[in-house]
Amino acid sequence: MFKVLFDFLENTLTPVAGKLATQKHVSAIRDGFIGAMPFMIVGSFLLVFAYPPFSADTSFALGQWWLNASKAYADEIITPFSMSMGIMSCYISACIAYNLAQSYKLDVMPTAMLSLMTFLLVAAPMKDGHLPASHLGGTGIFTAIIVAIFVTELTRFLKERNIGFTLPEQVPEKIRQSFNLLIPAMIVILTIYPLNLYVYHHFNMLLPGAIMALFQPLISASDTLPALLIAVLVMHVLWFAGIHGAAIVGGIMSPFWLYNLGLNQEALAAGTALPHIFMEPFLSFFVLLGGSGATFALVLMYIRSRSAHLNMIGKISLVPAVFNINEPVIFGSPIVMNPIMFIPFVGAPLINATIAYFASSMDWVGKIVSLVPGTAPAPIGASWAAGWQLNNVLLVFVLFGISFIIYYPFFKIYEKQLVTEEVNEAKSAHGEPVDETHYA
């Protein structure tokens, strides 16, 4: 069975996944979201201060002070959120275009600015002297992606065919870059803008609204348990093959995660039930405890292992694992292409995902309302992302215990195998009997 699996991974999955991981548009989208992430994390952090995790009738002194302060300074607290997370599609559009233009060796900053202009043109056309912000947040994400790719590909098309202004060599480079942007900008205004006007006058919605309507079935499906399990399975099968599965799955799922996060934040502000579960913090702090494969439990086992190799890997991996970085244990064990570790490496995250999904759907734990750095320790990150819900911390420890139980028998099998190999190597090196009680 494992021979068939390894043949499939080596000959079929690995080449396809490798090409997908390096595909220019996928990479640009992934890197674009990463580039915009600081704005969204800071904005989400402040949103938690605007909506304290206390009931209005709390007798807790800190809770009363927090509630009063959040009411008194509501506008001041929420403004940084509105200027970051609230208009995140603007940052995403510019960052994706920047990264895609960089891969094509185009003028990156002019291309990013043209992408931003185009996005604002279709997502926030001025009315009565104001720019509407309804599509600048989560509802504009898919439009931002499409606009960034369109603008960059248009710029590349024109450059490859030398369509543009020819300026003398004496003209400074920055001026040359500005003039190179004139024709793409005119084409955008003559094509995308009329399309937006047509959609608005015939369907009473802007282009982002129409795009969201097209993506709605996928968006709805992205927050289901089957979608969660498929994402986790694909991620870990890729990791088992030595490919960064989290980067590939994250690049594909990020638009859906951020859109769902935006809806949860809107529901939080409106005081209604939070509608969505599956987002990046949910994956990071409930499913991937210690990193892909939920390997934090395995690292703790390694530290007390009788195998010198596993003991060393455990000590090296402990601190990174606390911050959800587990490349040392994945490649040092190794877990990659290790048949003994395949079942727990894939199975533990799938079981964690199932339990956490049902716990969230039953409102036993708080749902995600804030983006948190993925390197936050799991108990802190899980609580922080849900507005400091303490039930989330309890669930993290329950899932850690389950991961420990799943890994333990496979760890013992692997440990026994390595101890035997280490004893034989020691005997061979010394040429004399070795005291095996050292390994007992």
Image: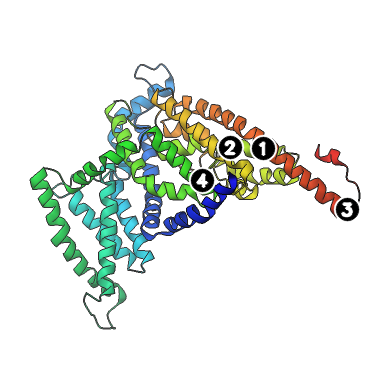
Which amino acid type is shown beneath numbered disc 1?
A: Phe
Would residue 229 be found to the left or right of residue 400 on screen? left
> What's the distance in space between the residues labelled 4 and 3, CA to CA?
41 Å
- Of helix, strand and loop, which one carries label 3? helix
In primary-sequence order, the first of circles 4 and 3 is 4
Mark 2 and mark 1 in contact? Answer it, CB < 8 Å: yes
Task: Find disc 1 in the rendering and name its residue.
Answer: 411
State the CA–CA distance, disc 3 to disc 1.
Answer: 28 Å
Lower position in the chain sequence, tag 3 or tag 1: 1
- Identify the residue position indicated by label 2 in the image: 344
The amino acid at mark 3 is: His
Q: Position of residue 164 (x, y in %)?
A: 22, 74
Q: Residue at x 57, y 29 (%)?
A: 402
Residue type at mark 4 is Val
**Circle 4 sits in a helix, a strand or a loop, which is it?**
helix
Q: Secondary structure at mark 1?
A: helix
Reading the image, the residue beneath label 4 is 237
Q: Quadrant of the N terminus?
A: top right
State how far apart marks 2 and 4 are (Cα). 12 Å
Residue at 39% in and 30% down: 367
Residue 127 in view in this figure = no
